[in-house]
Amino acid sequence: SALACGSVEMSPTADPLPDAVIYAAFASFFILLIVAALALSKSNNKHSTKKAAPKPVEKKTFTSAEVAKHNTSEDLWIILKDKVYDISAYVEVHPGGDSILNNAGGDSTEGFFGLQHPERVYQMIEDYCIGDLVQTKKDT
């Protein structure tokens, strides 16, 4: 008998693969797909560009005593060159880990302006500015 182009003739003597082998092959393929998807998902999460957004707030003036009350990782204010910054939203994504807490509720000017921070940090911090530090008689 003549075969059409692209068709394959089945040999009458060839035994078909058992169903269990076919099911195992499909199952292995799908497991491999799931493992690959999970691996890709985890690698994408490691390099996440999750951006911490500051809370919008009307700028005010604060005393050092007021700033000092905000000294935890959940509620973190710092002073940089007589400006007050609420960096609470940034704590979890800070590349330097807990070092961000070194001057929690206080003046971080000296620690902030160092070689550890790239130039872009100096522009980024302005998004977190909530006001100015005012000096009181107690501060002088």
Image: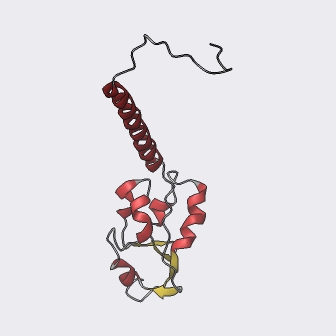
Quadrant location of residue 122?
bottom right
Q: Is residue 24 left or right of residue 116?
A: left
Counting labels gives: 0
The residue depicted at 33 percent of the width and 29 percent of the height is 24
Q: Residue 21: in sight, yes or no? A: yes
Q: Name, please, the residue furthest toward the right.
A: 5
The x, y position of residue 56, in whole percent, is 52, 80
The residue depicted at 52 percent of the width and 60 percent of the height is 113
Q: Name, please, the residue furthest toward the front.
A: 1
Q: Is residue 72 left or right of residue 95?
A: left
Of 35 and 30, nearer the camera is 30
The residue depicted at 67 percent of the width and 20 percent of the height is 4
The x, y position of residue 80, in whole percent, is 49, 70
The residue depicted at 51 percent of the width and 16 percent of the height is 10
Tell me the quarter of the image containing the C terminus: bottom left
Q: Is residue 28 left or right of residue 109?
A: left
Colour scheme: secondary structure
Quadrant location of residue 119?
bottom right
Q: Is residue 88 above or below residue 110?
A: below
Q: Is residue 23 left or right of residue 93?
A: left
Q: Is residue 118 above or below residue 14?
A: below
Quadrant location of residue 66?
bottom left
Q: Residue 107: in sight, yes or no? A: no
Tell me the quarter of the image containing the N terminus: top right
